Image (cartoon, grey):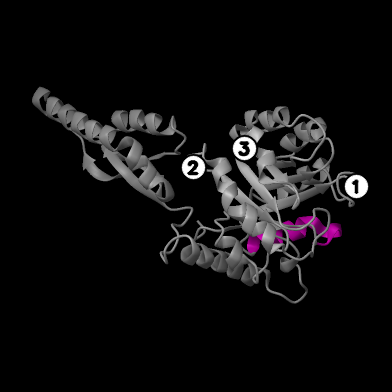
Amino acid sequence: MAPGRARVAASILDADFANLGNAVRRCERSGADRIHLDVMDGHFVPNLTFGARTIKSLRRVTRLPFDAHLMISEPGRYVDEYIDAGCDSITIHVEVEEPISPTLGKIRRAGRAAGLSLRPATPLSALEPYQELLDIVMVMTVEPGFGGQKFMKDVARAKLLPARDLLRHKAVGGEVHVDGGVNRETAEFAGGQGVDVLVVGSALWIKGHDMGREIRLIKALADEGYQYELNAGVPPIPRDKWVSFARLPKTFAKRFMDEIEAGGIPVLMLRGNGQINPDGVRDYEVMVPASAEALTAERHADARDRYLQDAEDWRRALRAAG
């Protein structure tokens, strides 16, 4: 598990295209959290990169999530290919001249995260009609098409923090991405705007630089920005940290897990270190993400009390019958 809140999606746009498999492996070894795949068609943006067949080949060389950014004119026509290629999340552009909702719906029905990206000049309000279909909002802080451009701080300031409101329907898992000009000089500012995922490209591929060190610095600086700009000086909750919300016999734990998950909060049910029940089976831990602990308590604290009481009544009944 990676410490901290910020996540780095390593873009391979500036890698050696003659050896992309090695580039992806290097990103994984260096601590990247996912691979960002910039797909360009030479029409929607003035550049041409790679397509679904290349991504499918790369899928075999890493277990990291693949984050596809489709900068293409007709994403609806090709999205099935990127789903089949093994992309874990697929982001398209709101500026495309075709219906957007069907493509986002298809991505989500395939069990992948669906996102919308917008150019620097496009207002955030353009995403509002598709809000309920979004798992990802990707804010471009450069003009899409080429790596190595300068970070547009004014665009980041205007859009990144408000983008969070477009994901308010997601109890857990909604992500704001920033893409363009992200490096150690801009990471702290981006983190202070509440960004979840920083797409980092050219900064990772500078000859002679230690990629792992760059990734660690960018994450640390982004978390520091979040801590002092948005969290009153308190370090952010690590994104991968889970906490026990209740400790219950298996049957009760499963029912409670289903109840919590119905509200969009993920749950892990693990056999814990609790008491061994009269049926000989140890209690299970109902685990939730630490970042969602307060929300879970707000929604389910009363239900937890009822489950704990029901479990104790069940234990007493079993003991009496035995």
Indicate which disc, 1 or 3, sits on the residue closer to the N terminus. Answer: 1
Q: Which of pointers 2 and 3 indicates the residue nearer the eye?
A: 3
Q: Earlier in the sequence, mark 2 or mark 3?
A: 3
* Residue reaching furthest to the top: 321
The answer to the question of whether label 2 and label 1 lie on touching residues, with beta carbons closer than 8 A, is: no
Whole-percent x, y for residue 252 in the image? 29, 30
Residue 85 is covered by the magenta coloring: no
Tell me the SS state at disc 1: loop
Q: Nearer the viewer, residue 131 or 253?
A: 131
The outermost residue toward the bottom is 208
Q: Considering the whole magenta stretch, tell me its main secondary structure.
A: helix
Q: Give whichever of discs 2 and 1 has the lower sequence position.
A: 1
Q: Residue at x 18, y 27 (%)?
A: 314
Q: How many marks?
A: 3
Label 2 residue SS? loop
- Is disc 1 surrounded by few (<14), some (14 to 19) or many (20+) residues within 10 Å? some
Please say if 183 is above or below 297. Answer: below
Residue 57 marker? none
Write down the region rendered in magenta: 15-29
- Residue 117 x %, y %: 71, 45
Residue, disc 2:
172
Q: Residues within 10 Å of mark 3 (few under 14, many from 20)?
A: many
Identify the residue at image location x=36%, y=49%: 243
Can residue 270 be seen here?
no
Q: Amino acid at mark 1?
A: Gly
Q: Amino acid at mark 2?
A: Val
Residue identifier under label 3 = 134
